[in-house]
Image (tube, rainbow, N blue to C red):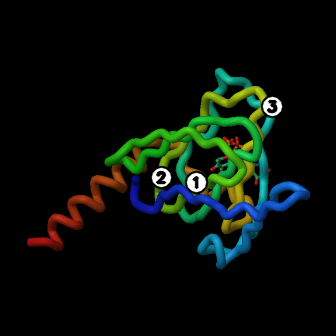
Amino acid sequence: MIDGVYKVSFPIHGDEKGSLIAIEGNKNIDFTIERVYYIFDTSPNVVRGKHAHRDLKQLLICMHGSCDILMDNGLERETITLTGPDKGLYISGFVWREMSNFSQDCVLMVLASKKFDTADYVYDYDEVLQSALQARVGGERGAM
Ligand code: T46
């Protein structure tokens, strides 16, 4: 997968009463949870996101239904289908993301490492490309 991105499976505590999943900051995930938001009632033909974050770690969980998450760091692009309340997608780093193909019943919950800050959003994909190219050139120079 793209650097700084990985899938997580959470253990389900199940008994005769049903199922329960617990997520603790700095235990199951490597950040303190500063914010929780969730996305629902999104039409299947809508594409959300279309931005990167400068400094934010997030854990995305489809509590209900499913949706597709595209991630792109300027060098690699990958799309995964997120479904199941025990499956998470961790995204950190300067990664462009788009969410699409929402099922009618999709509830996408996001745990975030920082409070909402519009200054952290980058809506210009070229900036992600430029950053990837600069990192690659820097890496090649370092290897000389
Ligand atoms: C991300 C993807 C996965 C707030 O007031 N507080 C918040 O914490 C957030 C996240 C949003 N908002 C407001 C800002 C907009 O007026 O809610 C509205 C919709 O937000 P946005 O268009 O940014 O939603 P998405 O689905 O395009 O992106 C969101 C997150 O913003 C973003 O950080 O990574 O989900």
Q: Relative to 103, does residue 35 appear above or below in the rendering?
A: below
| Residue 41: image tag | 3
Residue topped by disc 2: 95
Q: For the point 24% across and 59% down, which residue is it?
A: 136
Q: Relative to 56, does residue 27 appear above or below in the rendering?
A: below
Q: For the point 81% across and 57% down, which residue is it?
A: 19
Q: For the point 75% across and 47% down, which residue is it?
A: 63
The mark that comes first in sequence, 2 or 1, is: 1
State the image coordinates of residue 121 (x, y, percent, origin top left).
Answer: 60, 52
The disc labelled 1 sits on which kind of residue? Leu
The mark that comes first in sequence, 2 or 3, is: 3
* Quadrant placement of the C terminus: bottom left
Q: CA distance from mark 2 to mark 3?
A: 25 Å
Q: Give the class, few, some or many, for how many residues have Cα within 10 Å of label 3's Cα (few <14, many ≥20).
A: few
Residue topped by disc 1: 89
The disc labelled 3 sits on which kind of residue? Asp
Q: Relative to 111, does residue 51 appear above or below in the rendering?
A: above
Query: Which quarter of the figure has residue 45?
Result: top right
Q: CA distance from mark 1 to mark 3?
A: 20 Å
**In the structure shown, which secondary structural element does the residue marked by tag 2 occupy?**
loop
The disc labelled 2 sits on which kind of residue? Val
**In the structure shown, which secondary structural element does the residue marked by tag 3 occupy?**
loop
